[in-house]
Image: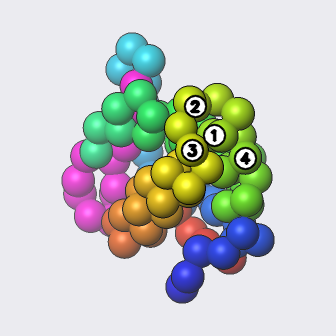
Amino acid sequence: MPILPHTLITKSPTAVETNVGPEIILMSVENGECYGLGQPGSDIWRLMTPPITFANLTARLCADYDATPNTIQSDLLELLEDFHRRNLITLT
């Protein structure tokens, strides 16, 4: 499924998260794998509560980070596609 501006991004109910300092570690129950998100990934994960559209998530990150909107959008798409492949998020 392509990620479009109106795509709603929701955390998977099977994704388990824990804070380790300022960063989040995720566990995919389905895959039996753990993922360290780092600071930017942790910020993005936190912004997905409650579910958020791709356009709104991009706008929030543009307000918080000193990078061009195109760079933020490109990097965000890459991360969200990875999350989706790993069943950590759903897209509607």
Judge the density around disc 4: few (<14), some (14-19), many (≥20) Cα neighbours within 10 Å.
some
Residue at image coords 64%, 29%: 64
Q: Are marks 1 and 2 in contact (CB under 8 Å)?
A: yes
**Between 18 and 48, which is closer to the camera in this rendering?**
48
- Of the 4 image quadrants, the one containing the C terminus is bottom right
Q: Main secondary structure of the magenta part?
A: strand
Name the kind of residue labelled 3 in the image. Thr
Name the kind of residue labelled 2 in the image. Tyr
The image position of residue 12, as x and y in percent, is 53, 60
Q: Which residues are magenta?
A: 23-34
The residue wearing badge 2 is: 65
Q: Disc 3 on helix, strand or loop?
A: loop
Name the kind of residue labelled 4 in the image. Ala
Judge the density around disc 1: few (<14), some (14-19), many (≥20) Cα neighbours within 10 Å.
some
The residue wearing badge 3 is: 68
Residue at image coords 49%, 51%: 71
How far, Cα to Cα, is label 1 from label 4?
5 Å
The residue wearing badge 1 is: 61
Q: Are marks 3 and 4 in contact (CB under 8 Å)?
A: no
Q: Are marks 1 and 4 in contact (CB under 8 Å)?
A: yes
The image position of residue 31, as x and y in percent, is 27, 64
Of callouts 1 and 3, which one flags the residue occurring earlier in the amino acid sequence? Answer: 1
28 horizontally vs 73: left or right: left
- Of the 4 image quadrants, the one containing the N terminus is bottom right
52 horizontally vs 1: left or right: right
Name the kind of residue labelled 1 in the image. Leu
Q: Disc 4 on helix, strand or loop?
A: helix
The residue wearing badge 4 is: 59
The image position of residue 59, as x and y in percent, is 73, 46
